[in-house]
Amino acid sequence: MKYLLLLLSIFVMNLGYAGSSSIVEVAGYSCMGSDFSRKETERMALQDAKRRAVERSKTHIESVTEMEDFVLKRDWVEAYASAEVKVLAILSSIWDEPGNGDCFNIVLQAEVVPSEQVVKSIKELNEDDPRLPLSIKVWSSADKLKAGEMLKIYLQGNKSFFGRIIYTDAAGDLVQLLPNAHRPDDYFQGGVRYDVPSALDRFVLRVKEPFGRESVTVYASTSRLGNIDTQQLGAIFKVNTAPSSVATRSRARFTEEPQKIKNPGESRLNEFAETTVTVLTEP
């Protein structure tokens, strides 16, 4: 997609899988003693922080997510018990003063990604339930589009969220559809269907070359997303941030607004969801 009003895009009633996760800022700690080297101690502190990130996510599911269905709640806890932990950023790392012992402290931002298989089976039955972790549905009226055809995109979250919609054309160029110049708000109400474009947007989505496989990704969080580099292109925004960095930058809000976390018992968490749908466009 090269120009604003002649925008190509995509979606299928067959919804793309919505990946849910939690992003945690958490501290880890380990002491060297007589059995471990400094390198091993640093590794164990990192593992301690990862373990605490998983435990914090499980606690969030158990306490913040209000579920009366015990089986459903158990399934979510199980999904996080087998979660993958991705380190997004190391915010600080320091050894204690010599007089305080040979101990290493680390604070990291990690994404805790629950078992995809378990989560997918849960959402198939309960995807609109606001008591569940954040989930976003994205769809359209067609799964294949030809030159000149018009498209409208729809999205809906199971709870309120902050978000952005990124469109990637067949040439790999990115634009931000929402927020845009005429609809700058990045806050979306839960349970409400949003149309893109709407009358507020003042543009249309019309298929134009380059043709091929296109994608639209919605990044959503219960906290504001991290910033990406954009410049206005009519009603929408051209994305200047490298495509490989958009997902990471969108998850980076805590890094941009650091909180002084020093003790292993401290942490902060927000729910995150990323949904991508693709389509083939033709002349």
Image: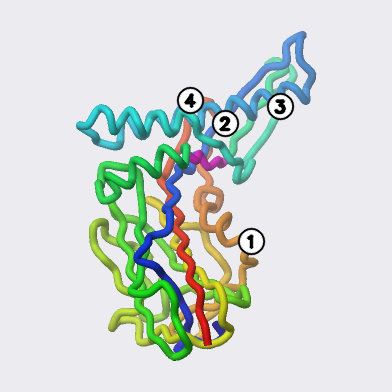
Instruction: Give residue 42's mark.
Output: 3
What is the secondary structure assignment of the residue under circle 3?
A: helix
Residue type, label 3: Glu
Instruction: Look at 55% across and 40% down and name the residue there.
Output: 110
Q: Which residue does the numbered mark 1 point to in the structure image?
A: 244
Give the CA distance from mark 4 to mark 3: 18 Å
Answer with mark 2 or mark 4, whichever residue precedes in sequence: 2
Q: Is residue 224 visible?
A: no
Q: Nearer the viewer, mark 1 or mark 3?
A: 1
Instruction: Look at 45% across and 40% down and name the residue there.
Output: 117
Q: Does 37 sit left or right of 42 as displayed?
A: right
What is the secondary structure assignment of the residue under circle 1?
A: helix
Q: Which corner quadrant holds the N terminus?
A: bottom right
Q: Which residue does the numbered mark 2 point to in the structure image?
A: 50
The extreme left residue here reads 68
Residue type, label 1: Ser
Give the CA distance from mark 2 to mark 1: 24 Å
Q: Which residue does the numbered mark 4 point to in the structure image?
A: 265
Residue type, label 4: Gly
Instruction: Look at 45% across and 42% down and name the residue there.
Output: 22
Answer with mark 4 or mark 1, whichever residue precedes in sequence: 1
User: Which residues lie in the magenta part?
Assistant: 109-113
Answer with mark 4 or mark 3, whichever residue precedes in sequence: 3
Give the CA distance from mark 2 to mark 3: 13 Å
Q: Quadrant of residue 190?
A: bottom left
Mark 1–mark 3 CB contact (< 8 Å):
no
